[in-house]
Image: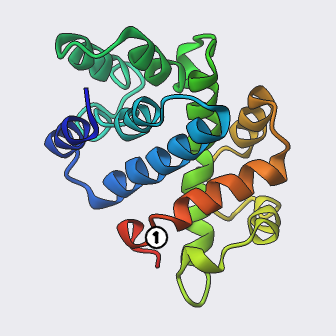
Amino acid sequence: MNRDDAIELLHQYTKNENLRKHAYAVEAAMRAYAKKFGEDEEKWGIVGLLHDFDYEKYPTAEEHPAKGAEILTEKGYPEDIIYAIQSHAEYLGLERKSLMDKTLFAVDELTGFIVAVALVRPSKSIMDVKVSSVKKKFKDKAFARAVSREDIYKGAEELGVELNEHIAMVIEAMQSIADDLGLA
């Protein structure tokens, strides 16, 4: 189990460049939190990379992330990685038990929202995104309406991190891979 294998699996199942970029953004945020919490950065990064790898082929609630979990089980991925990926799907109703589970849920929706905020900046650069601009856009219900603000608030709360600190951490993580995200 390593990043190269996870990237290969992601690319095998995910052809859409924006979905790949989402995986990279979640990976960066997961790695940043793993470092903060003194956890395994490689493992947490792999969870971020693979959390939606099956989504393009299996986009329904009946299939995602269940099909992905089956594939990862067949490939011998550890149970805690598979569980974290399953628990990020709120509709499955699984308890998020570990810090890794909680972190994946907390960063998933937020990374997408931050990308949306970056794309409406004149520069279209994540380097210009600030916590205040993200929080301001939270209030605009029409902006990035598909992103669940409730999940973002709930994620930070479950993680035990203050919302501004959480947003800042994820922005900084994403800024570190701005080129990979096409948001430099």
**In the picture shown, does residue 129 fall above or below 98?**
below
Residue lying furthest front in this view?
A: 38
Indicate the quadrant where residue 10 lies.
top left
Measured as percent of width and height from the top left, residue 71 is found at 21, 18
Measured as percent of width and height from the top left, residue 118 is found at 58, 73
Measured as percent of width and height from the top left, residue 115 is found at 54, 64
Locate the N terminus and report the quarter of the image it occupies: top left
Answer with left or right where residue 43 lies relative to residue 72: right
Name the foreground residue: 82 vs 59.
82
Q: Which residue is mark 1?
A: 178
Residue displayed at 27% across by 19% down: 67
**Colour scheme in use:** rainbow
Residue displayed at 19% across by 52% down: 15
Q: Residues within 10 Å of mark 1 (few under 14, many from 20)?
A: some
Q: Secondary structure at mark 1?
A: helix
Query: Callout 1, which amino acid?
Result: Ala
Residue displayed at 28% across by 32% down: 54
**In the picture shown, does residue 19 fall above or below 12?**
below
Measured as percent of width and height from the top left, residue 32 is found at 57, 46
Answer with left or right where residue 138 lies relative to residue 35: right
Indicate the quadrant where residue 99 lies.
top right
Indicate the quadrant where residue 68 lies.
top left
**In the picture shown, does residue 83 fall above or below 90?**
above
Residue displayed at 34% across by 13% down: 78
Answer with left or right where residue 27 lies relative to residue 97: left
